[in-house]
């Protein structure tokens, strides 16, 4: 077990940074029971594979940490989760986090980032991506997976095309869904941004080394997300890991004999992650191939700069290049999901914004709802409350796209889409890439 000095951390601000396929969303009042589905442990269980000792451990941790000041609370919870990880492993630690989120709204709000912390710590205890990935869960927008990949890059001394191409290869099995593959490649974008000391252009250029376009786009999304995280939450666990540096002890995993002291050379141009004078930055300075993933994150930047004014963010999206305005309003829907998990309330927020791009706002909400739980049910509940038939069709098609990523089996995709309102099943099937009938 490695040891390292922990830097003091301030309370993480409300989670507004999620991306389609890897949403980071605040969950106050959200039903957390689905997050613990299919979890198992070698220890005793308490329904649905939940270890029986996780609930009392979470309660004890909440009693110890819950009434502290913000900075002390954050440090206390992270220390407790790291201790649970060291004693019992990754999955019990994630289940403890599930319970903590039920007990403390502050944990529910920042649960994705706490999950990042567990993934980072897990890799440092057992530096094998494949082994640690198998123990992570998709709870809280799969933050554990992302933390593992972040720690992996911070631990290595190279990020060349061979390293990047091989990292997520174990998850490119046609029999599996794309969900875990996405978490790996999206996490790669996070890790590369850290590896290049949060110089976003360098990270994006590294993502360009990936051979597959889908892989490149997924990597871009992680890089843009990390750019925002580091700027508006500079003490989140990933940033702290980068500032402390990688462990230089030898590791057993094959390939870890690389020179970890070799760091990328300093970029010729410094990078500024945000520009308070330009709500479209950094998208406004990006090349065309990066724009879609950039604008899928951009409302997190806008809301950070404008004091969480959704109406102002909607107006700012209308200033984007015409071809990117739908994507920007989809990002607004994702940001709305960070404000509420109630379908009616989320739909009302979308209705208060741009009428022209309202359908794209609904798409952003439904994708983020599904991403948060890795289940289709939350998306089905949202699309049902969308009133306009054209917008409802867009919502169900967006849901179908999420189902296509979550599920590999065609019959299961068809079954999930079959739960849509009858006249809109065809739109869900279209998004899921199923035959019309």
Image (cartoon, grey):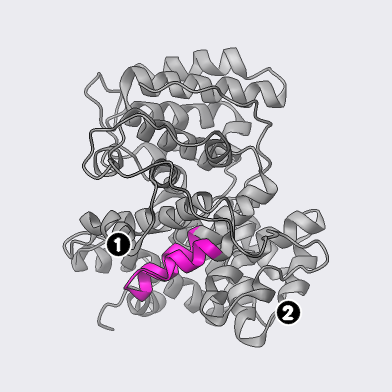
Q: Residues within 10 Å of mark 1 (few under 14, many from 20)?
A: some
Q: Is residue 155 above or below residue 402?
A: above
Image side of residue 205 versus residue 336, left or right: left
Disc with the residue nearer the chain's start (1 vs 2) = 1
Residue 66, position as x, y percentages in the image: 63, 20
> In this figure, which residue is indicated by the disc labeled 1?
178
Residue at figure coordinates x 47%, y 55% from the top left = 192
Residue at figure coordinates x 68%, y 41% from the top left = 13
The quarter holding residue 52 reads: top left
The quarter holding residue 144 reads: top left
Image side of residue 212 versus residue 106, left or right: left
Residue nearest the observer in this picture, 150 or 259: 259
Q: Residues within 10 Å of mark 2 (few under 14, many from 20)?
A: some
Residue at figure coordinates x 81%, y 61% from the top left = 276
Mark seen at residue 318: 2
Give the extent of the magenta segment. 202-222
Residue at figure coordinates x 21%, y 42% from the top left = 254
Residue 304, position as x, y percentages in the image: 74, 54
Residue 251 belongs to the span the image colors magenta: no
Residue 406, position as x, y percentages in the image: 32, 59
Residue 333, position as x, y percentages in the image: 61, 64
């Amino acid at each position: 077990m490695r040891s390292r000095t922990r830097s003091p951390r301030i309370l993480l601000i409300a989670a507004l940074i999620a991306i389609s396929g890897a949403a980071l969303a605040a969950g106050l009042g959200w039903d957390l029971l689905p997050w613990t589905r299919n979890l198992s442990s070698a220890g005793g269980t308490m329904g649905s594979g939940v270890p029986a000792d996780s609930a009392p451990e979470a309660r004890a941790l909440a009693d110890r940490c819950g009434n502290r000041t913000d900075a002390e609370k954050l440090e206390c919870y992270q220390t407790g989760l790291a201790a649970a990880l060291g004693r019992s492993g990754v999955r019990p630690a994630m289940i403890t986090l599930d319970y903590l989120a039920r007990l403390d709204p502050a944990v529910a709000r920042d649960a994705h980032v706490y999950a990042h912390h567990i993934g980072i710590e897990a890799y440092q205890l057992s530096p094998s991506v494949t082994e640690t990935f198998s123990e992570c869960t998709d709870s809280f927008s799969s933050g554990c997976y992302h933390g593992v990949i972040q720690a992996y890059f911070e631990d290595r001394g190279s990020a060349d095309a061979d390293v990047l191409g091989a990292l997520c290869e174990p998850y490119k099995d046609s029999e599996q869904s794309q969900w875990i593959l996405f978490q790996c490649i999206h996490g790669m974008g996070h890790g590369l941004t850290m590896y290049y000391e949060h110089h976003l252009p360098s990270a994006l250029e590294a993502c360009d080394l990936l051979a597959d376009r889908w892989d490149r786009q997924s990597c871009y999304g992680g890089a843009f997300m990390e750019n925002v995280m580091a700027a508006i939450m500079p003490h989140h666990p990933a940033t702290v890991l980068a500032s402390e540096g990688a462990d230089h002890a030898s590791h057993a995993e094959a390939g870890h004999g690389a020179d970890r002291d070799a760091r990328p050379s300093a970029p010729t141009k410094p990078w500024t992650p945000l520009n308070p004078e330009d709500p479209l930055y950094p998208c406004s300075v990006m090349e065309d191939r990066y724009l879609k993933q950039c604008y899928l994150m951009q409302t997190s930047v806008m809301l950070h700069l404008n004091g969480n004014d959704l109406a102002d963010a909607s107006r700012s999206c209308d200033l984007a290049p015409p071809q990117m305005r739908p994507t920007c309003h989809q990002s607004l829907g994702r940001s709305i999901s960070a404000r509420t998990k109630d379908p009616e309330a989320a739909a009302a927020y979308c209705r208060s914004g741009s009428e022209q791009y309202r359908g794209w706002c609904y798409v952003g909400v439904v994708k983020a709802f599904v991403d948060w739980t890795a289940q289709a049910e939350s998306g089905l509940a949202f699309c049902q409350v969308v009133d306009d038939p054209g917008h409802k069709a867009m919502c169900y098609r967006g849901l179908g796209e999420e189902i296509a990523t979550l599920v590999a089996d065609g019959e299961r995709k068809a079954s999930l889409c079959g739960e849509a309102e009858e006249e809109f099943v065809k739109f869900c099937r279209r998004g899921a890439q199923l035959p019309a009938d």
